[in-house]
Amino acid sequence: MTAVRRSVGTIVVALIASLFLLFIVAPVVGLVSSGGARGLATLASDRELLASLWLTIATATIATVLGMLGGTPIAYLLARRTFRGRAVVAALMDLPLVIPHPVAGIALLLVLGRASPIGAALYQAGLRVAGSSTGIVCAMLFVSAPLYVSAAREAFARVDARYESVARTLGDDAWRAFRRVTLPLSARGLTAAAVVMWARAISEFGAIVILTYNPKVVSVLSYDRFTSYGMSEALPVAAVLVLFALVPLAALRALRAGEPVVSS
Amino acid sequence: MLGILADTLLVYVAASLTRPIQPVLEAFSARTGIVVQRESGASLEHVRKITELHRIPDLLLLADVEVFPQLLVPKYSTWYAEFARNRMVVAYTKRSKHANEINRDNWTEVLRRGDVEVGRTDPDLAPVGYRTLIMLKLAERFYKKPGLAKSLISAASERNIRPNAAELAALLAAGELDYIYDYQSVAESNGFSYIALPDEINLGDARRAREYSTASVRVRGPTRGSETEFKGEPILYGLSVPREAPHPDAAARFLAYLTSPEVINQLRAAHVDMLDHPVVVGTGAPAELR
């Protein structure tokens, strides 16, 4: 009886898991099968799409590098140090995840727009945020950095703090211990965190369209093609984006495949 | 739960009309108990939701009545009605650069200064976008300054283009832009200052239809690589109830309300230049409009 109950349970769980997988995969497969071949075929001739794709990749990469530079110290502090306001800092880092993205774009405009003190100073220095690649990077950074910080924090937490302590007792200062011990041991996790951030950045639309409509990243171009020409022209653009996103996501899986499986 | 049980009215509204129409929608909902759902955006975006996604609203209120015969009639709608006018203006705020010196005589010069940020709407997506280009062509002829249109268009660079009138207005309000080409109703409902342009170029005078039609622009057509020519004509907003509207009765009730003297006056007070009576084109319009 117990065996029967177990196998029924297994079937139910498998069924739920399959339905869930189908729910996630079906729209993506539908998108790629509808527009993937055409998107790739027109990639060489469609200069607007090609330029948009490079712009998206370049801005997402810059945003990710900035996210790593700024987010790694915070992630490390949150993982390793106990300090007053730690919970508040952690919650603040998650805030962009709950802000609707067009609202995030407006918030960035308020802080970095020409009418703000920071924006005015940048504008004077010849760096304009709205309507420029800088605006795209800012929007991407704002909405996707929390994912990096969260995953990087996990990566640091997985490294046993005692290794650092040993290095310190052997004479390394804190920075050297971090660089020689913690960083190499968490490198794979940090890379995975960066890939997730990059993937989220290239898919951003809501915040970007408020800050920078032109030049168009792929998500904005896809919206533009849909509005101007309809679904048949929007699908290849979106499909190309999905296909390009597959590259880092597959790389991420390859990285994780090398990780030891934790068992208790 | 009440929302599910109650009758519903789904309205697609041109972004430039959203602010003034919202109180009317709310008052209608309060009066009738009908749940009103509004989606605001560029007119062409609404059209694509219908033709590509088959998300059919109960009522369409668009910024250019010509969109109906070009893209929606007869497949998606058998009739449409002209219901309001508008005119083009140059809108700005107190903090816009040179706000204290711009006027009806020098705006073409102020807007070409190097330190000024001028914005406009995407001519490929929104009627206000191509109307801006037509207005500038008319201005070139009216002010007898060859090359004026081209230099004013390049002064409102690509980076200052936005997809619809409301998003453009938001950038002016945020101080990101100094001046925008937009509708008078948008400028007034946002509390912007504006330069009222001469009737010869503002596309707001129905008697000047022939004069306006001498200027035209080519924008992206409905298929890639194609182009559509838009001739200048007086700005007319259009409405329609699509053939497959899920709640046509609620739409008809709203149209009766919208065209009542009380609401016409309310919208005129909100700077929407409502016609005394909608002008219906086609057949099958609800009795409330005839």
Image (cartoon, helix red, strand yellow):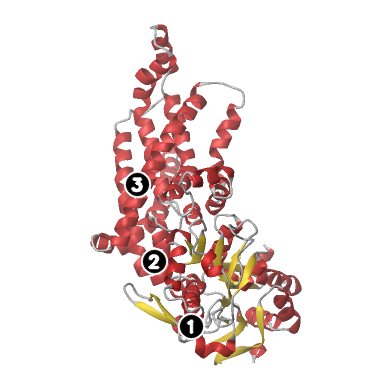
> Which chain is mark 2 on?
A
Q: Which mark is residue B279?
A: none
Quarter of the image holding residue B177?
bottom right
Q: Secondary structure at mark 1?
A: loop
Secondary structure type for disc 3 = helix
Frontmost of labels 2 and 1 is 1
Q: Which mark is residue A58?
A: 3
* Residue at 39% across, 61% down: A222
- Label 2: which residue? A225
**Chain under label 1?**
B
- How far across and how far down the image is residue A189, in percent? 38, 31
Give the CA separation, mark 2 to mark 1: 25 Å
Residue A62 lies, with reference to residue A75, above or below; the image says below
Subunit under mark 3: A
Closer to the camera, A226 or B84? B84
**Kind of residue at badge 2:** Arg
Residue linked to disc 1:
B232
Name the N-terminal-most of marks 3 and 2.
3
On the image, the x and y values in percent for residue A202 come to 39, 49
Quadrant in which the N terminus of chain A is drawn: top left
Relative depth, front residue between A14 and B70? B70
Q: Looking at the image, which residue is at 43% across and 68% down?
A: B151
Say whether mark 1 and mark 2 are on the same chain: no
Q: Residue B148's image quarter? A: bottom left
Name, please, the residue furthest toward the top. Answer: A170
Foreground of the two, B249 or B188: B188
Q: Amino acid at mark 3?
A: Ala
Residue A136 x %, y %: 44, 49
